[in-house]
Image: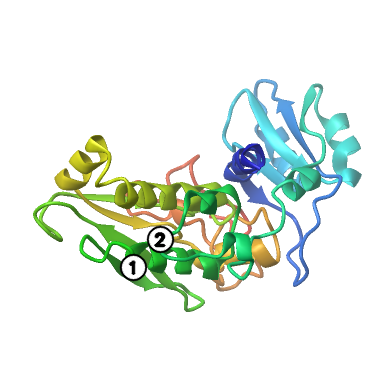
């Protein structure tokens, strides 16, 4: 299971420009391949053609090669367009299936309870169960943690996290902010940020290195900063990247939260002005 989590985390974290049709039904990636395409010099036109053919463009802006996710019916067109391709993933749908079904808190063996055990990190979970995890973890360490909220998503979901502190009390030390799931499909980052919180609280009294860190800093950890997109990846499209905000004048949905910070906003080559792009 751990190998599967890492594999899909790697696939999902790279996907950018999206041309897969958006429907109310769950998208099936069975038979889709992940290909590495070697780019010749002066290949800007080629890149735009690949974006039209591919379901997803991986690592956009790379000069030497592009990694693409391609539907079965477009594979021949890709191979005819470029001189050299290498298969990275033979069947993206099969790789996604290796993640297994989402584990529910209703399952006896994986039921979330205070304090959650390390078994929590061996499988992926629903959005609702991630909120339960935070509440149960905080409930076990009420004297050095609190649940925090940082706003509300477009679809009305509360952005929820946990604040952890050590000696000196709440808010007495410099702050460290850790957040995950900026890109909806990057489920591995949800688990990673939660593991940070779990380690800091459950090992504080037994691990001198962790105690020293928690006594030196206040940690603010928000595992899912894109809850709408995250929920959508669990119900409709496992490889969805952006949030689910509507775009005026466009039928395409979503903005890439990681491309919408004030610093170097809309930098050329780093973001797209097209609402249909994964980096919009």
Decide which of 251, 151 is in the foreground and name it.
Answer: 151
Q: Quadrant of residue 163?
A: bottom left
Residue name at image x 45 percent, y 63 percent? 133
Please state, as top left, top right, bottom left or bottom right, where the N terminus lies in the image: top right
Q: CA distance from mark 1 to mark 2?
A: 7 Å
Is the residue marked by circle 1 packed among few (<14), some (14-19), or many (20+) residues within 10 Å? some
Residue 9, percent from left and from top: 60, 43
Residue name at image x 36 percent, y 46 percent? 199
The single residue placed furthest to the bottom in the displayed view is 156
Q: How many marks?
A: 2
**7 is higher (above) or lower (below) than 202:** above
Decide which of 235, 36 is in the foreground and name it.
Answer: 235
Residue 82, percent from left and from top: 80, 27
**86 is higher (above) or lower (below) than 217:** above
Residue 39, percent from left and from top: 69, 24
Instruction: Give the residue number, with chain letter if any, for mark 2.
Output: 115
142 relative position to 59: left or right: left
Is the residue marked by circle 2 packed among few (<14), some (14-19), or many (20+) residues within 10 Å? some
Q: Earlier in the sequence, mark 1 or mark 2?
A: 2
* Label 1 with label 2: CB-CB less than 8 Å: yes
Kind of element beneath mark 1:
helix
Check residue 139 in the rendering and tell me which mark sits there, or answer none: 1
């Amino acid at each position: 299971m751990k190998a599967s989590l890492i594999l899909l985390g790697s696939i999902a974290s790279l996907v950018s420009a999206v041309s897969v049709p958006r429907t109310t039904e769950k998208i099936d990636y069975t038979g889709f391949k992940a290909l590495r395409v070697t780019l010749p010099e002066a290949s800007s036109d080629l890149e735009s053609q690949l974006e039209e053919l591919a379901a997803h463009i991986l690592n956009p802006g790379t000069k030497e090669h592009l990694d693409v996710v391609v539907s079965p019916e477009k594979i021949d067109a890709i191979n005819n367009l470029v001189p050299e391709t290498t298969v990275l993933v033979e069947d993206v749908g099969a790789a996604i299936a290796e993640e297994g079904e989402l584990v529910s808190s209703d399952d006896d063996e994986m039921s979330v309870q205070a304090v959650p055990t390390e078994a929590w990190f061996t499988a992926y979970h629903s959005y609702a169960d991630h909120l339960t995890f935070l509440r149960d973890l905080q409930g076990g360490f009420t004297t050095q943690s609190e649940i925090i909220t940082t706003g509300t998503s477009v679809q009305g979901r509360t952005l929820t996290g946990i604040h952890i502190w050590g000696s000196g009390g709440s808010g007495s030390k410099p702050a460290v902010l850790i957040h995950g799931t900026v890109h909806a499909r990057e489920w591995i980052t949800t688990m990673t940020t939660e593991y940070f919180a779990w380690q800091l609280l459950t090992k504080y009294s037994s691990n001198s290195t962790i105690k020293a860190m928690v006594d030196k800093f206040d940690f603010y950890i928000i595992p899912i900063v894109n809850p709408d997109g995250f929920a959508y990846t669990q119900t409709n499209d496992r490889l969805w990247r952006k949030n689910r905000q509507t775009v005026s004048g466009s039928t395409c949905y979503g903005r890439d939260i990681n491309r919408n910070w004030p610093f170097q906003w809309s930098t050329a080559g780093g973001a797209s002005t097209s609402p249909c792009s994964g980096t919009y």
